[in-house]
Image: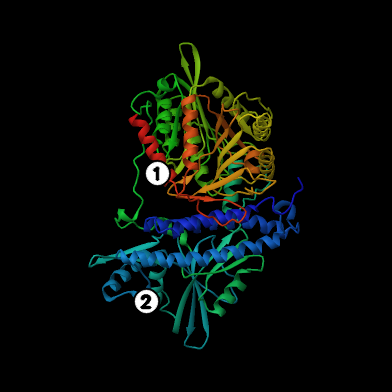
Amino acid sequence: MTKDKNQYINRELSWLQFNARVLQEAEDESVPLIERFRFLGIFSNNLDEFFKVRYATVKRIDEAGKGGKSELGIRAAELLELITQVVIKQQAHSLVILNAIQKELEKENIFIINEDQVDEEQKQFIKEYFLQKISPALVTIILNDNVELPLLKDSEAYLAVKMALTSGTKQFALIEISRAMDRFVVLPEKEGKSYIMIVDDLIRYCLDDIFNIFSYDSISANMIKITRDGELDFDSDLSKSFIEKISDSVKDREIGDPVRFVYDKTIDDDTLDYLMAKMGINSKDSVIPGGRYHNRRDYMGFPSLGRTDLLYKKIEPLRIKGLSLESSIFNTISTKDFLLHTPYQSFSYVVKFLREAALDPQVKTIRITIYRLAQISHIASSLINAAKNGKKVTVVIELRARFDEQANIDYAEQMQDEGVEMLFGVVGLKVHSKMCVIEREEANGIKRYGFVSTGNFNESTAKIYTDFTLFTANQKILKDINKVFSFFHTNYRIHRYKHIITSPHYSKSKLFALIDNEIENKKMGRPAYIKLKLNSISSYKMVDKLYEASRAGVKIQMIVRGICCLVPGVPGMSENIEVISIIDKFLEHTRLYIFGNNDDPKVYISSADWMTRNIENRVEVSCPIYQDDIKNELLEVFDICWSDNVKARRIDQSQSNQYKTDHNTKVRAQFALYEYYNDKLKA
């Protein structure tokens, strides 16, 4: 097939459409009000990371003079301009949504006030709060033509202050608003009404207290924010350990090149020109006019004020039928496998597994991969506990988990100090697989137990990310997983695997073989289909292979949360492919591959998306599901997600994020799945 410009959707533009779906949740009036605020925060936080990583990468390509068309499908300079145009529109729309939410909150007697709306009763509280909590932590920088501007921190919020001095001159200053400050100040309630002030506005109210040594006729303050290139650059100093190089790179990120500058569009022209000149902002940076308040990621932590009626109802994680938290997990899974599906079911099973391994005298070794840990991690404490009990504990920790590098470094050092053997992955490959295997001495010799997951072993994200974890004592699968750990020790040896699919050595060829099998079945007149649930698909090789299957008549259903470079529904190319995306209360993180196999489905759960980095540049594991009841459960879970007609959007050539609607009974997959598991318990 001849390639043309309509064969793929550009990765960056597709990601922006994913973030538009997040913004749709903020706009959706059926979403509880405070949750809508929090989706605005997620939208903004996503955008910050996008500019730090993806925009910065495109900018690097452009500055290297490469053009970028072969890597991006479009000239880098053109793509930078397109991104900026899309983001400006999205930012403007997000401000409209913000204003609408605030008006709805006022109907609920919740008022977000600014410095011009403070009444006499609130004045004393604000002044006292400022003196006690804000003033001691403020960093105020007086700007001078003869003094170089101090380095502005990545994604920190600053108030750009302009004073018209009585002498007839101007004085500029910057106020750094520390992340350590509470972003929302809850004022005393009055007559059943709640009042909240954003800390920036509280500071604006107290500008005279900050600048009282100056004599001025007027003073104004507008917010600005700079986003810096978030890529880690490693030095080649051979005397440094890997952990030292990562640590130094994380520090260097704070002085990365600027890639985005956002400013309050009401700022005076002379203030804006002065600041941009001082910061060296140029035409290749994304300069975006915004609203009064830029760090809208802070809305992720908007106070609930006790108003549970304006929040999603919290669910109580369910137990897994037949698997008790009050008896030995090893004894139970020695006879059959069990599947955990968070957050519908309790993550406590993972912690229980490791706690039991730490205490069980028969357990001799524990091996586990770690990508992102919770701030306070029961996983880490269980592994330390095991080491203290004389187990040989090996932890493969990924120090390059983006924006969690420092947290992982801190935990790595802590575990190392406690006697845990730490491995820092493989040179040139991120370790993204999610797996654990223990060896237990039993009457008939050493027996392995373990688990394989689609998600991070993180108690915090397990409450909001959907993920599968398979608990198993299947010795064939665990023998393969043990080989992966051997690869971490001696990564010049490439192992053969009989059951699991691993990146970077085998994923592409194995997945191609599974797709080819469906193509062959279709040609032979046998049932043939493919069902995929992914976070993202951007590998053109994988996209092309799915196009080949579509042209052969194989029906393909895909649920893709984020980036989708595949263009579905195009005659002669992808008419047999349908794609939907679900954005809802929880973040869809499960990765599930289903291949029809002549009505004897082959089913895998995986840590890998179908992106080039996951297929070719990371250590990933896709685990087969052999047990019939779990296989059937996963088939049913996929079908429930596919039938969503409330929160599912269709992904198509238009990239318009139209909701998938029909006239059948309404199905909201995430709510339906909770009921599905609840019904299983009662059966």
Image quarter where the C terminus lies is top left
Can see residue 179? no
Q: Earlier in the sequence, mark 2 or mark 1?
A: 2
| Residue plotted at (52% across, 43% down) | 409
Residue assigned mark 2: 116
On the image, the x and y values in percent for residue 62 come to: 71, 59
* Category of crowding for the residue at label 1, using alpha-carbon neighbours closer than 10 angstroms: few (below 14), some (14–19), many (at least 20): few
Q: Secondary structure at mark 2?
A: helix
Image quarter where the N terminus lies is top right
Residue assigned mark 1: 671
Colour scheme: rainbow
Type of amino acid under label 2: Asp
On the image, the x and y values in percent for residue 317 come to: 36, 38
Say which of marks 2 and 1 sits in front: 1
| Residue plotted at (48% across, 57% down) | 24
Can see residue 571? yes
